[in-house]
Amino acid sequence: MVDELSYRRSRFQPGTPICLANDQEWTFPAPTADSEFAVEAAETEYLGLIHAIMEAEDQSDRRRAELALAIFLIGLNYQLSSTELANLFTFQPRSRELTDSQHAFRVAGSRSHSLAGKTGKLPQAPSPGAQRRSSGRRVLAWLRTRGLMRKWLPSSRNGEALS
């Protein structure tokens, strides 16, 4: 079994514990003004993922965007390979654990969007047409750059990812 404590980064931040597919709770950092999100590159990536959730055309696009945000957040607190991430986020199809995790990430995404809006850091919403059509592709590209697409999206034979 993977030991959550052994994968923690030295700059580990408190946040929301969420039970993943290995039946352990992993801490997803809560964004604050003085956290990792204050670093411009991380903040830009974070806000882009928040936008992707907001712009999702359907439930599948939204879940993929929520999954990308979850991977981004867990990466702030833990040093994990793409295989380890795939194992943590691959649940049994239609399982209660999958449903619970999807709900937890939906709530986390909503809180993140709310905080970004309150701090004035959420960029202006793009015009409804062209930008919405590309949000799903942006999330897929984001996941691909992290070596995650071939491992478990949209779903694998042995389990189901959050999407």
Image (cartoon, grey):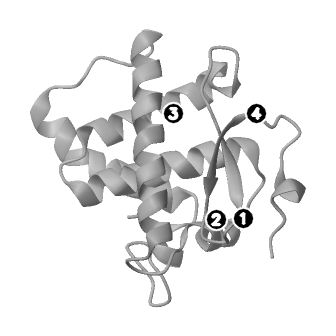
Give the image location of residue 163, x and y in percent.
Answer: 38, 64
Crowding near the residue tagged with mark 4, few <14, some 14–19, many ≥20 C-alpha atoms within 10 Å: some
Q: Which amino acid does label 1 sit on?
A: Ser
Relative side of 117 to 13, left or right: left
Whichever of labels 3 and 4 marks the residue nearer the N terminus, that label is 4
Question: Mark 3 sits on what residue?
Answer: 46
The CA distance from mark 1 to mark 2 is 6 Å
Question: Mark 2 sits on what residue?
Answer: 85
Residue 81 disc label: 1
| Residue that appears at 70% across and 69% down | 84
Crowding near the residue tagged with mark 3, few <14, some 14–19, many ≥20 C-alpha atoms within 10 Å: many
Crowding near the residue tagged with mark 1, few <14, some 14–19, many ≥20 C-alpha atoms within 10 Å: few
Question: Mark 4 sits on what residue?
Answer: 13
- Work out whether residue 13 or residue 9 is closer to the camera in this orientation and state it: 13
Whichever of labels 1 and 3 marks the residue nearer the N terminus, that label is 3
Give the image location of residue 62, x and y in percent.
Answer: 30, 51
Q: What element carries label 4?
A: loop
Disc 1 + disc 4, Cβ < 8 Å: no
